[in-house]
Amino acid sequence: MREMPGSVGTVRTEYATFPAPLTLESGAVLAPVTIAYETYGRLNREKSNAILVCHALTGDAHAAGFHEGETRPGWWDGVVGPGKAFDTDRYYVICSNVIGGCKGSTGPASANPATGRPYALTFPVITIRDMVRAQKRLIEHLGINCLAAVAGGSMGGMQALQWAVAYPEAVRKVIAIATTARSTAQQIAFNEVGRQAITTDPAWAGGDYPADSPPVQGLRLARMIGHITYLSDGAMREKFGRNLQDRESVGYGFATEFQVESYLHHQGDTFTRRFDPNSYLYITRALDYFDLAVDDSLAAGFSGVKASFLVVSVSSDWLYPPYQSEEIVNALAANGVDVQYCEIRSNYGHDAFLLENGQLNYLISAFLDHLLVRDVMETGAPTIVERASINDAARIMIENAVNHLPVLAERGDLVGIVTSWDIAKAVACGYGSLDEIMSRSVVTASPDESVTEAARRMEERSISALPVVDADRRVIGLISSDAISTLIGRCA
Amino acid sequence: MREMPGSVGTVRTEYATFPAPLTLESGAVLAPVTIAYETYGRLNREKSNAILVCHALTGDAHAAGFHEGETRPGWWDGVVGPGKAFDTDRYYVICSNVIGGCKGSTGPASANPATGRPYALTFPVITIRDMVRAQKRLIEHLGINCLAAVAGGSMGGMQALQWAVAYPEAVRKVIAIATTARSTAQQIAFNEVGRQAITTDPAWAGGDYPADSPPVQGLRLARMIGHITYLSDGAMREKFGRNLQDRESVGYGFATEFQVESYLHHQGDTFTRRFDPNSYLYITRALDYFDLAVDDSLAAGFSGVKASFLVVSVSSDWLYPPYQSEEIVNALAANGVDVQYCEIRSNYGHDAFLLENGQLNYLISAFLDHLLVRDVMETGAPTIVERASINDAARIMIENAVNHLPVLAERGDLVGIVTSWDIAKAVACGYGSLDEIMSRSVVTASPDESVTEAARRMEERSISALPVVDADRRVIGLISSDAISTLIGRCA
């Protein structure tokens, strides 16, 4: 077991096979159904701390940590691990490969039990809802009735939304990032061009290509198209501009000359070594069909949901633009659903859901209710000793521009708090010592409680700041409603 | 000759062949060079009214009117013709097919004189500058030293910009629409994916495909990708949405189900019947190489230009976004060049340069200096007869909220003008009749002069409005600087 701070360490993909037929949205049945999955962290006794993380188009079950002998971590390692947004010290995080895929779950490359040969195009067409149905089996198999959260970006976000709609009793929170509730014409168009690239490659052979001779040219082309859509124009300008690859001047020819060409070729080539062309067809088709609207109304589509939602879009994402997230938010709000929305400021484009770990960790942590007081408290805030004079207290307040001064006993433990209001009281009534004016019943915060809890306590008591004290009641910081507002203010 | 209002009628493509070698930017030479072109309107005696219109990636010399037996007009018929922006009653409009193309000009499908067989990939790589060099030959061949204007959208706009840089003495005005001065990484990326689609089609055969068996699948795919980029997301939503094609419900399969798929297939299929795959490679490569910056500075690149410019972008164009037009405008302005800029509000996306005829006709007409006074004058403006009292004049001014009253003789012809300033003068000095206060030397405008000329006259004389008079000096309207500002104010 590799020990790395913030990493779940070495992990392994597990497989669960369900012999019972899975009835698909099309009416077709699939059996048996194998699901590849990984888990990180420990399921608690109440089985209430499970979070399902869903992958995008070409992802897999390997969301975090390292496979034995590999140096590249899972696809969402930036937000899954000890102390990260999906905190594996607190949560039991599950990630499964979608059905229709090619990373261990049943898909078109799996053996058709009726023939013993790969399904290829005899594999039934699947939908996002079918993917979620299969995941539900896995979740039940793991003994979980209700997920603390389902989260994902892009196609993973669609699955998260679909979970809330299909199983309202089984999801407490949904985190949907850089996604849509219904694929648009432009999204379908890009998917279709990718499929055409594959199916017009003669090597595709109607889907019945040998495993060792797939239609690599078509798949490579589909991936290159995809990669253009995953980056913003600005990111491409910044990353490649008009830079030439390994040459000083243009060559007036058709060989690779620009860095951006080289990048696309590389992305296309490596993809063909890890992905099945038929899976690409099936999964993009599932994207096309995705539409949570009922009678053309998204609000109607979300009418039964019970979860609370965090919806996140990316300012420069033109494949799943922010307006599509706003449509989700509006449809949820129309149902009175608890929904938070944030547009991440990022130049990366769609890929930001895999890259903007700082913003995502903050947003997701806060939403999952475990942004801790210690994460936002101010340290080094001034205090005053019990025996000081009222004049001293006033001077410290003014010099430090603070309104609250924790009052400490000689051993350093908290005995009270004094405010500018108390000073005014002293002046008005002629009090002479701190002892006469300070409040002794001080409401405090613990460094390890959630910011949300501390904020709620402040609001209930109409207090604008709490001293943060350790187990010995020593003051280690101050949490103020101003600081919390600043944090929350980062999002609309 | 077909007679249609606003149409140049039946037209024919002409061909000019130049035996002298054309030295290309790469250093390679091309000979002979044939250029396919069309002309509309008549060249005036001074040969000063010629406008060159340049086509985009897959366009041709047929910009306006109809070929014998065809019902579909040329590609820019909406703005080229009698009374249109490129007014063939006033201008001699020329459009030529670019070299490297496949519509009559020398390109990779032409016979290589050295072998008698198609050039294919032995055709030299060409650039936008080479296209313009070839056009320069054609223009000289037509006896023209200086073009009244060069205009185009997309790649046509690049040619227009290149003309101003390469031949500053030979271009008076440039109209560059939905274009860029240097191709970006994203644009190169889309071009490269299109090329890869063609060159990975086995039928491409290294470029040496038989004329009757070209790599249609690859070219079709390249065109489908292109078409996604030509439309905005919003236009696709509006035009196709998630509508199904000839079916009531989804079929859970890979056949064409969505309208947008059908549209792309249709666009791809028809394109393969009219375009040469090798030409697609050469022309997209010319786009990639296009970069007017010198030492990474666009301002330096434009330092020698002498033309005045109209730069037009399209709000929803994400392939050549408005910021790229703004870069052109800023670089021109940095050189003190006369440049007008307008961002067309349109939902069409890049294709708007072929579709937004209303806005384009207005903008181009105004820029080409033949937006006429009659087009913007106010009619029905109040006048006063010569014998009226000063009180009457004041009352009419106030009631109509005008500051100028043309004074008419009994037969209706203009004899003077009276303003509120004159009224004030009358009150101050005790004058009693219009005759004593009105100005008799009235500056007027003709309905058939250009707005720019009338505006210049107003500015020179510090007059805020001119009566518009016909040949008999009868007042038929009023043109005011306010009305002109309003028009100009439509653009930044």
Image: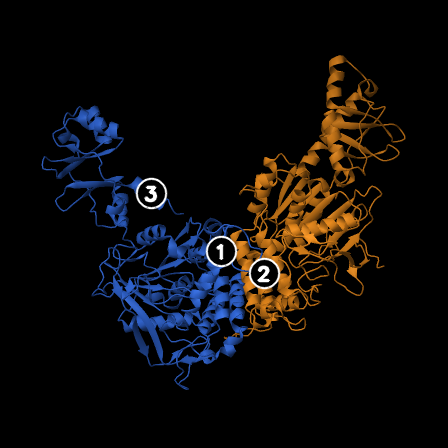
Chain colours: A blue, B orange
Residue A181 in sight: no
Three-letter amino acid code at disc 1?
Answer: Val
The residue pinned by badge 1 equals: A260
* Residue A485, numbered label: 3
Mark 2, Cα crowd under 10 Å, few <14 / some 14-19 / many 20+, is some
Name the front one of labels 2 and 3.
Answer: 2
The residue pinned by badge 2 equals: B226
Q: Between residue A397 and residue B63, name the one nearer to us.
A: B63
Q: Quadrant of the C terminus of chain B?
A: top right
- Name the residue at the top extreme: B429
Q: Secondary structure at mark 1?
A: helix
Residue A391, quarter of the rendered image: top left
Q: Are marks 3 and 1 in contact (CB under 8 Å)?
A: no
C-alpha span from label 2 to label 1: 18 Å
What residue is shown at x 37% (from left), y 44% (from top)? A489
C-alpha span from label 2 to label 3: 47 Å
Q: Secondary structure at mark 3?
A: helix
